Image: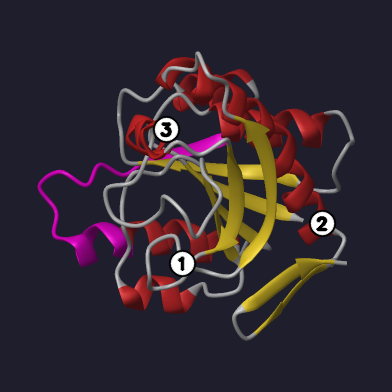
Amino acid sequence: MDVVVLASGSGTDFQSIVDASESGQIDARVVQLITNNPSAYCITRAEKHDIAYSVIDHRGLKRREHESKIIEVIDDIEPGLIVLAGYMRIFTDDFVDRYFGKMINVHPALLPLFGGPGMYGEHVHRAVLGSGMKVSGCSVHFVTNEVDMGPIIAQRCVPVMPDDDVDSLSSRVLGEEHRLLPEVVGAFADDKVHLEGDKAWIE
């Protein structure tokens, strides 16, 4: 199964899928990286693995203009799956509807807790620590028109330790992301991910 990944930063989640593919862990291959950040380190990762990439900078473009350029790349490939792996842009309803059921996102918390607009990166972990929660984790979900509210495919938990700060909790959650995300991609490749209404699960 061909996979397109969208990322905006260092690309560690992108790397986890590439590693799982190259090791034969999953029957999927990343054929394209799309980033909106010309200086993102994920570009270097793509170059190291001879993976095609497109830099589609959103600055100076209206949202639909930016999205049309992304659509052009994706539709030329016709991938089996689109993965948002640290992609720091919210798409229009039309874009989401176009790829509904074949676009997933990884989020660094146990949704539906600590999700929604503005809840990303260290903001999520700071909110978790401030809440007094004893567990956190990560979620992989289908992308819908409500930010972080799509049907949850799979989750992993990690403990929140008494001496945790944002960095230590982030590191623990990220480690689980790097295990969970490739597993979900592999399940898609094996046709084992099911979606019915607002429920999703892995066979």
Q: Residue at x 51, y 72 (%)?
A: 99
For label 2, the residue is: 187
- SS for tag 3? helix
* Percent of width and height locating residue 136: 57, 39
Residue at image location 31% in from the left, 50% down from the top = 89
Q: How far, Cα to Cα, is label 3 from label 2?
A: 28 Å
Magenta stretch, residue numbers: 50-68
Q: As drawn, which residue projects farthest toward the bottom?
A: 197
- The residue sitting at 52% across, 44% down in the picture is 109
* Within-10-Å neighbours for mark 3: few <14, some 14–19, many 20+: many
Q: Which of pointers 1 and 2 lies earlier in the amino acid sequence?
A: 1
Which disc, if any, is residue 149? 1
Vertical order, 159 against 64 (above or below): above
Q: Tags 3 and 2 in contact by the CB under 8 Å rule?
A: no
Q: Which residue is mark 3?
A: 125
Q: Quadrant of residue 120?
A: top left
Amino acid beneath label 3: His
Residue 54, magenta (yes or no): yes
User: Is residue 50 visible in the rendered structure shown here?
Assistant: no
Q: Is residue 125 left or right of residue 25?
A: left
Query: Residue 141: x, y in percent?
Result: 58, 60
Q: Residues within 10 Å of mark 2 (few under 14, many from 20)?
A: some
From this view, report whether residue 201 is shown above or below residue 21. below
Q: Quadrant of residue 146?
A: bottom left
Image quadrant holding the N terminus, namely bottom right
Q: First in sequence: mark 3 or mark 2?
A: 3
